[in-house]
Image (cartoon, coloured by chain):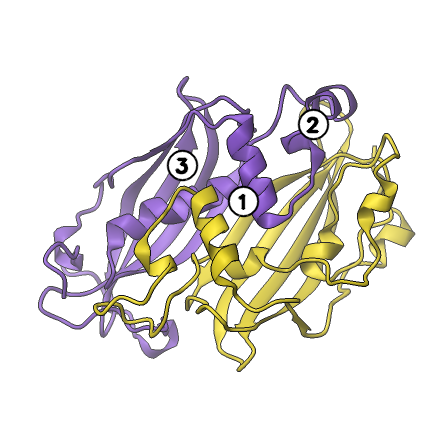
Amino acid sequence: MTPLNDEVRRYMGLSTGPIEASEPVEKGEVRRFAQAIMDEHPRYAEERPDDRYGAPIAPPLFPALMFRRPLGKPDPLLHAGDPDYDGLSLASHTGLPDLPLPGSALVSAGVEAEFYRYARHGESVVQRSVYRDIYEKQSSRGGQLLFTVIDSEFRTGGGELLLRFSYRYVRR
Amino acid sequence: MTAHQLCFEDVAIGDEIPELVRGPLTSVHLMRWSAATENWHRIHYDFPFAVEHDKLPGLLIHGDLKLQFVFKCLMDWVGDNGWVWKVSAQFRDVNLAGETLTICARVLERERAKDFGIVNLSIGIRNEDGDESIRGSAVVALPYRGGPAVPYPFQPAETAKVAEEA
């Protein structure tokens, strides 16, 4: 049970300013990512003469998943001894503070993605995110489910649009 | 334009695009994805936590990973000179470690824009039992036969849709 109380409701509309990923698009990170998605296309490692991207690139959704905790920021694993700690911190990826709902299970409910341009190796990536919506819905199995919708936009450091992402999460 | 480039004229409503199969996706595959994205959510690798704490039926295949497969399936279809513009996916059910996933898509609509064609598709993911876990839609752009590649970076605002010819 995760009630939509006033404390949680205050997060609706909360947004980040521009946040630059702690590292630019790195060749090694792209390799690990490409291997993990089982898409080892050579365009992710090298520039090919017949490519029109101008440089080696990262897979399309890479920019949305390259935001990591910078050195010096609080380590969320400090709480790993808590039996309710689920290991997930949206704050690490979006820059938005986690909702004050400790102990509630969270899973992905859906996503909408718009894709405009690949990120090139060596480019910096900047994101802005916002809690677009937070709402409750009756579960088919009884009880209330809390849905969170986060919109994110990813641009290069030079301001070129890479992709937009809207993620919907559900907490039980 | 590459020899095998799909063109708008090649596509008909009702066409099913080549399926992409991934799996069996073991807990090792999930751990590799978790490590590549620094996603430490325990429901993907900590079986006791997933089952006993979160009351899940097993380790969950990441929604983000499944979305990569959807993009891969569509990108393979549209080719280097096409573009996968939009993907919308509802995660209707979970997939568990050990399952094999099949990504599929079917053409729903075709529309002509000024410089390229737009194709709307339904998308889905099912496991080896035929259970559908993802349902959604996609919008891709394809070059016209003999025409230029879809603009890169993609620029949808510069197009003006016209009615599909009978």
Residue at image position (74%, 47%) is A135
In this image, A105 relative to B34: left or right?
Answer: right
Q: Position of residue A94 (x, y in %)?
A: 68, 59
Q: Which residue is mark 3?
A: B124
- Packing grade of label 3 (10 A; few <14, some 14-19, many >=20) is many
Q: Quadrant of residue B33?
A: top right
Disc 1 target residue: B64
In what element is the residue under mark 1?
helix
Q: Is residue B158 visible?
A: yes
Q: Colour of chain A?
A: yellow
Question: Would residue B166 be visible to someone looking at this image?
Answer: no
- What is the display colour for chain B? purple
Mark 3 falls within which chain?
Answer: B
Label 1 vs label 2: CA separation? 18 Å
Say which of marks 1 and 2 sits in front. 2
Asked if marks 2 and 3 fall on the same chain, the answer is yes
Q: Earlier in the sequence, mark 3 or mark 1?
A: 1
Q: Residue B135: image x %, image y %?
A: 45, 37
Q: Amino acid at mark 1?
A: Asp
Which quarter of the figure is the C terminus of chain B placed in?
bottom left
How many callouts does the rendering have? 3
Instruction: Reply above or below: A142 against B31.
Output: above
Q: Earlier in the sequence, mark 1 or mark 2?
A: 2
Does residue A75 lie above or below B51 as drawn? Answer: below
Label drawn at residue B46: 2
Q: Quadrant of the N terminus of chain B?
A: bottom left
Give the class, few, some or many, for how many residues have Cα within 10 Å of label 2's Cα (few <14, many ≥20). Answer: some
Q: Give the image location of residue A152, x and y in percent.
A: 61, 63
The residue that appears at 23% across and 74% down in the rendered structure is B114
CA separation in Å, label 2 and label 3: 27 Å
